[in-house]
Image: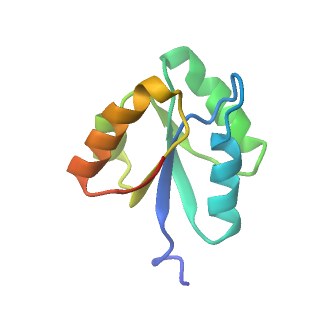
Amino acid sequence: MSASDAPRVAVAGVVRRRQGIGEYLARYVVRHGGSVPAFLGSRPESLEDGRAVLAGHGIGARGFTDLASLLAQCPVDALIIASPAATHVAYLDAARDAGLHVLC
């Protein structure tokens, strides 16, 4: 797979509050040739935590608090939804409308 073919994957839920796996799924994507250029946080204050978590895995990603802004500023091919269950439907609907592949 060339760098131009590598999937660009955003992750919702990289900060582990209870049993989160978003950071590990991001690491898996990168380990297997993809990139994680962006992530979703629940609020502005959590973005720095998310950047730190991903940086701990060697991933430099931009943080966003809403999916529309992420998609407008950082095109991706897929979305991993590893956020709390209450966010799943909204993220799934938005990802579907944007034509993204989704792992939820």
Which residue is outermost to the bottom?
1
Q: Is residue 97 above or below residue 82?
A: below
Residue 99, given in percent of the width and then of the height, sits at: 25, 57
Question: Looking at the image, is 59 positioned above or below residue 29?
Answer: above
Q: Residue 27: x percent and y percent?
A: 70, 54
Q: Would residue 87 be found to the left or right of residue 54 on screen?
A: left
Q: Where residue 46 sits in the image (x, y, percent)? A: 58, 20
Q: How is the image coloured?
A: rainbow
Q: Is residue 29 above or below residue 70?
A: below
52 above or below 43? below
Give left or right: position of 77 versus 93: right
Q: Nearer the viewer, residue 78 or 56?
A: 78
Q: Residue at image x 26%, y 50%? A: 96
Q: Residue at x 56, y 26 (%)?
A: 47
Q: Is residue 60 left or right of residue 56?
A: left
Q: Position of residue 1 (x, y in %)?
A: 55, 84
Task: In this rendered view, identify the residue nearer to me: 17 or 45.
Answer: 17
* Depth order, front residue of 19/23: 19
Q: Total label count? A: 0
Question: 5 left or right of 15?
Answer: left
Residue occupying the far right of the picture: 56
> What's the residue at 67%, 25% (across, down)?
49
Q: Quadrant of residue 77?
A: bottom left
